[in-house]
Image (cartoon, rainbow, N blue to C red):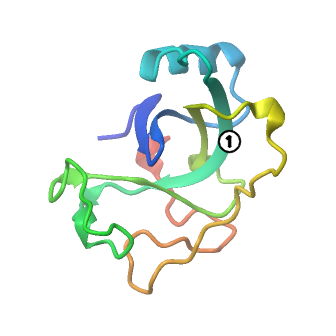
Amino acid sequence: MPKEYPALMVEDSGYAAILRGHGLAAEDLQAAELAMIGKPEEGWFTEVEEAHFDYVPRVKWCSRHPLSGGWSCDMEGDWHGHWFAVRETDIEACHFTIIRHTDVDPTEVSEPTDPSFCPPLEPGDDETCTHTPTCPTDLESER
């Protein structure tokens, strides 16, 4: 079954909305934010990031990942997937937009982040950045 967007995404810092594509209309971003994560609390800001991800659903055992520290998600051992960063690419199946709430004022951020950086994982990890210019899978079912 294809993944439907916008979708709720859990990050280390909390919930975020994930949408397929880059250069999305402001009204689409606002609608997704309200539907998925609501309005930011007072003193918090909306952050929008265009990113490159892949999503590969399968039966997963998240606690076995070497960087999990023993943490497992609610779907441990069941059919599910996680988005993971891939190198910047022109392949539209890997283009996503993330909307999150942050307590950092975006007008005061001094150091831009490099969205093409993906830290290497151990050999054999099931979610390893390919460090290639293309998305590791061409997800026909997700288009």
Q: Residues within 10 Å of mark 1 (few under 14, many from 20)?
A: some
In the displayed structure, 27 sits above or below 112; it is: above
Residue at the left extreme, as displayed: 77
Q: Residue at horizontal 65%, vertical 12%?
A: 27
Q: Is residue 9 above or below residue 12?
A: above
Q: Position of residue 43 (x, y in %)?
A: 62, 20
Q: Is residue 74 left or right of residue 96?
A: left
Give the image location of residue 122, x and y in percent. 45, 83
- What amino acid is found at the position of numbered circle 1 in the picture? Glu
Residue in view at x 47 percent, y 28 percent: 6
Furthest toward the bottom, the residue is 123
Please state, as top left, top right, bottom left or bottom right, where the N terminus lies in the image: top left
Residue 131, picture quadrant = bottom right
Nearest the camera: 114 or 21?
114
Which residue is found at the position 59% from the left and 72% from the top? 119
Query: Vertical placement of 52 versus 26: above or below?
Result: below
Position in image of residue 109 (x %, y %): 79, 41
Front residue of 11/79: it is 11
Give the image location of residue 85, x and y in percent: 55, 59
Task: Please tell me which residue lies in front, 15 or 138.
Answer: 15
Q: How many marks?
A: 1
- The reply, left or right, for residue 5 in relation to residue 25 is left
The secondary structure type at the circle numbered 1 is strand
Q: Answer with left or right where residue 79 lies relative to residue 51.
A: left
Q: Return the residue at label 1.
A: 50
Q: Residue at x 70, y 20 (%)?
A: 25
